[in-house]
Image (spheres, rainbow, N blue to C red):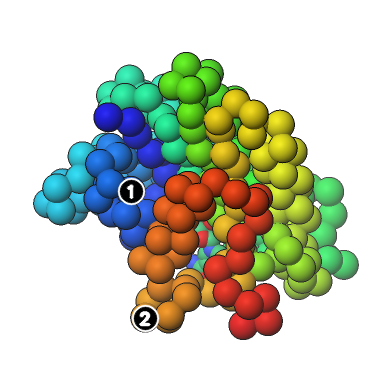
Amino acid sequence: MTTIAIIGAGPGLGAAVARRFGREGFDVALISRNHERVGGLSADLADAGVTARGFAADVRDRKALEAALDAAAATLGPIEVLQYSPVPHKDFMRPVLEIDPADLVGPIEFSLYGPVTAVRQVLPGMRALGRGTILLVNGGTAAVPHPDRAGTSIAFAAESAYGHLLHDTLAGDGIHVGQLVIPGAILPGHPRKDPAVLAEALWSIHRTRHGFRHFADDLDS
Ligand SMILES: NC(=O)c1ccc[n+]([C@@H]2O[C@H](COP(=O)([O-])OP(=O)(O)OC[C@H]3O[C@@H](n4cnc5c(N)ncnc54)[C@H](OP(=O)(O)O)[C@@H]3O)[C@@H](O)[C@H]2O)c1
């Protein structure tokens, strides 16, 4: 059996994706900074019949992220699907005229260096498997920058460019790269932005394997 590694796995989208892929037989590696929280989430998933393990890493700590992904593959089995979806810190969302270069360090480490580190760590395993899926999840500022959320807008643009390049470059190797843009907030009970509906959309991107960017909802919603 293969593994989905969810980087930035919390009780919202992370848990919903874990359940959706778990239902299809994937083992699930949950990665976030708080080991207790991902441990608790793993126990909840076990109750639902899903094999899951929690691994602690801050995505801004490259060595820790690499070690967590290695431990996940060693414990659960090869990583076929990588989802990068940590929720950005609110400090990254500052007005464009108030930021200086130092303010961009966090967003860039979080949204660019993190995905680059994670992808480089899992690619050899995906190549060995002969297949793989890389899923990037972003807010609406990935598509339309917002002047009051400069850090995420700028860093999501870089992440999007990286993902798009990977999409084009890895397609011939059986590795699909897709991005889900979620405009506005994730809203339990919403017909398009409930976590379970978004998890279904990510499952569909993994299964249908076409196109890079997908929208969970209309951009002005
Ligand atoms: N929530 C929204 O309204 C919304 C709207 C649009 C798009 N999105 C996208 O949806 C995804 C998140 O979904 P969600 O909000 O439902 O979150 P979630 O899956 O419930 O939790 C995400 C987890 O990310 C982890 N995280 C934050 N910073 C991290 C770091 N530096 N290193 C490692 N892990 C980190 C946090 O756990 P720890 O504290 O344990 O690290 C958090 O529990 C993100 O891709 C976000 O861009 C969310």
Say which of 162 and 168 sits in front.
Answer: 168
- Name the residue tied to disc 2: 189
Q: Relative to 44, is 99 on the left or the right?
A: right
- Going by the numbered disc 2, the residue's amino acid type is Gly
Q: Relative to 11, is 139 on the left or the right?
A: right
Please tell me how crowded label 2 is: few (under 14), some (14-19), or many (20+) other residues with Cα within 10 Å. Answer: few
Q: Earlier in the sequence, mark 1 or mark 2?
A: 1
- Going by the numbered disc 1, the residue's amino acid type is Phe
Q: Relative to 99, is 202 on the left or the right?
A: left
- Measuring 80% from the left and 71% from the top, which residue is drawn there? 147
Q: Determine which of the numbered discs, if any, sits on residue 21 in the image.
A: 1
Q: Where is residue 182 in the image (x, y as percent from the top left)?
A: 57, 67
Question: Label 1 vs label 2: CA separation?
Answer: 20 Å
Q: In this view, does 120 lie above or below 51?
A: above
- Measuring 40% from the left and 61% from the top, which residue is drawn there? 200
Q: Is residue 2 at all visible to an observer of this figure?
A: yes
Report the mark closest to the observer, 1 or 2: 1
| Residue 97 sits in quarter | bottom right
Q: Where is residue 13 in the image (x, y as percent from the top left)?
A: 41, 60
Q: How many marks?
A: 2
- Measuring 41% from the left and 59% from the top, which residue is drawn there? 199
